[in-house]
Amino acid sequence: MTVRLAVLWIAVVILAVAGLVPLLTMFLQSVVVDGQFNLSFYAQIVTSSRQWSLLGNSLILASLTTLGTTLVGLPLGILLGKSDLPLRRTFIFLFTIPLLIPPYVTAVSWFDVLGRNGLLSKSYPSLAATTSSWLFGLPGCVLVLSSTFLPVVMILTITFLKTVNPHLEEAARLSSNWFGVLKGVTVPLARSGIFLASLLVFLLSLGEFGVPMFLRYNVFPVEAFTQFSAFFDYGAAAAAAVPLALITCLVLLLEANFLREKTYQLRPASGAALQIRLGRLRNVVFLTVSLFCIVLVLLPLSALLVQSASQAAYTEAIWRAGDSLLRSLLYAAMGASLLVLLGFATGYLIHSRALGICRSVDTLTVVLFAMPSTVIGIGLISLWNQPSTTFIYATPAIILLGYIAQYTALSSRITVSTLSQIPVSMEEAAEISGAGWLRQVALIIAPLAKRGLAGAWLVCYIFCLRDTGITMMVYPPGRDTLPVRIFSLMANGPPDLIAALCIILILCTLLPLSLLAVVIRLKRQES
Amino acid sequence: MNIVEFRSVWKFYDQKPVIRNISLAIQENERLVILGPSGCGKTTLLRLLAGFITPEKGDILINTELVASDGTSLKEPRDRNLGMVFQDLALWPHMTVRDNLEFGLKAQGIKPESRERRIRETLRLTQMEGYAQVRPGRLSGGQQQRVALGRALVLRPKALLMDEPLSSLDLQLKTRIQREILKLHREIGFTLIYVTHDEREAAEIGKRMVVMKNGEIERIGPTHPRC
């Protein structure tokens, strides 16, 4: 076996151990009671009207969030990706912030606006009672999750619009206005990407448990978490997780059959993209987008800032959660580094089709990414909660395994996209020059892919840092991360402390991004 | 002596044959041109020889040694002692000209003094002495061609494979580079296997020509000098 195949097989095994085996173990434990095959947990689920209502709630929440994000994200993506609207990059950055932070932090920030003691209550106390009751329930969940996942649709719309051949739009522009061109040519050509974005939002909303838990809207992931953490009913938790896993697989089957090939390799179309000139509408559209951005993003963030605006709050935050903060940064950095290594290997495997199972590996990473974090958490505990494996279960290794399971798709897909832009002849030239595979990777492919890999690291760092679901389920005693600490404190902690912790978490996420922006700007100036 | 030999070689893509039963022997120091329209299989033939792909049927020999046979690659590309100039040149953009030349020498474990000597010699032969520390992106098209040629020749390969390397150049530059290739061939002496779809280029470069069509050899014979 060559070094290349050995490395790729090792990556596949690591991914399987981190993601696939835990899910299978969880499934097994849900159908075996006292050593016997038993479907009683499933019988309870099927016959319980409460479970059906939970499932209904989950599907309604996911559907409404998907609808909201698609209806708003698509035009927003078109405006920010194709028009001459001023400050487009700033808007993209601002609208993306909610995706970069744990969704429940956004829920907390909306609570600081609309809650009984929120910003609104200071001016309109009677209205705040209404908005508070509105926030705690389905509408509040839809609002928070829509603002969280809006950037998914927006960014993918912008990305896929860039793949449309500008000549096709030019041909249509000869006989139609921009609305007609968008409706008849641009959007239909980019529809696979838009549909993919909607599917992603659906799955991410379906698996979200932090926001519904905080806003007291009962959904399946909350049930699975409660069964596990409150009642320690292992089989019931696993059985509650399985329907979510099945829905996820079903939706992904759709994606695999209808979208995968169309959305796989993103290459910007050649030629200068056509820009929509807003003309007289430019100012009106600018004001509308600005207002929307202020209400959806800046207002809740400002509420957090106002709520936390005391030195005492930040001092207490550091005193009470400084250790969690350090652990968060450490685990996120370690997780991102491992994910880039593993994602590079799986991405290379998928790109080069070096093994016959490359398509299965790709599917596995996507399934794991879309799988609700509670499902992965329960799976990991099912597998590693054994006396002989405490070296994993009782250490941060289990958190890192969780990160690998859930987020390898991110680094893997970014790698595939990056590698597809490197001509295969680069690697072949190195190969024929006498370099072994590791040398080719280290000296040719990795340097050529360094921007993509750095981007992958940053994306993985952000996702690991914001992770709540998996970490909450699996963290060993005394090893919690900042998002988990905030979540635990939310039940009875003082609001100014919670807000200060949320602000610290947001800063930890945005600081590396800002650094990257500065580096990119400096590099541009140099060149 | 045969440096390269194809024996009844077949290659399939998606069960369709792209190379059909090709047998061909190439002599040491020969200048062979493979000519044919796009999609006729000429690049595939070159890639089979380089070892990037494996023939489903048939044998490939380099220096009388079997390197691929009936679906099995017996020698990795790096062990075949071939040089190749790619259609897009494939110069590594993050490395300087010198690093591009040195990469293969290092990979093959050549000692530093010997490496240094070979790099200097190659830079001289390709008239790139003043550009050792420059990155490929800053070079002109012709200079990039010379670096690609130098990178392939610095390894002293048994055969140099060239896959339409001049297709993107204008006529004037193309003619100049062709002359330089022939000059290098005279000075160093190597087997040249050159793929092109341009009959004039084939006549300039080759002594013998293989015309391919639909994955098969249509005819083999000497090239005719341009009138």
Image (cartoon, helix red, strand yellow):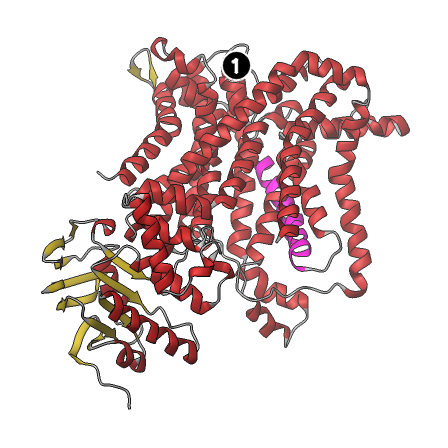
- In the figure, is residue B1 to the left or right of A112? left
Indicate the position of residue A467 as horizontal and vertical percent values: 56, 27
Q: Quadrant of the C terminus of chain B?
A: bottom left
- In the figure, is residue A84 to the left or right of A158? right
Taking depth in this image into account, of B85 and B50 the one nearest to the observer is: B85
Q: Within the magenta stretch, is there residue A72?
A: yes
Q: Residue at x 65, y 37 (%)?
A: A515
Disc 1: which residue: A229
Picture quadrant where residue A129 is located = top right
Q: Is residue A235 visible?
A: yes
Picture quadrant where residue B190 is located = bottom left
Indicate the position of residue A114 as horizontal and vertical percent values: 78, 29
Q: Residue at x 38, y 76 (%)?
A: B176
Amino acid at the residue labelled 1? Ser
- In the figure, is residue A381 to the left or right of B225? right
Q: Quadrant of the N terminus of chain B?
A: bottom left
Taking depth in this image into account, of B129 and B31 the one nearest to the observer is: B129
Q: Within the magenta stretch, is there residue A197?
A: no
Q: What chain does badge 1 belong to?
A: A
Taking depth in this image into account, of B87 and A151 the one nearest to the observer is: B87
Magenta segment, prevailing SS (helix, strand or loop): helix
Q: Residue at x 65, y 49 (%)?
A: A71
Q: Which residues are magenta?
A: A58-82
Indicate the position of residue B170 as horizontal and vertical percent values: 44, 77
Indicate the position of residue A277 as horizontal and vertical percent values: 72, 65
Q: Is residue A494 visible?
A: no
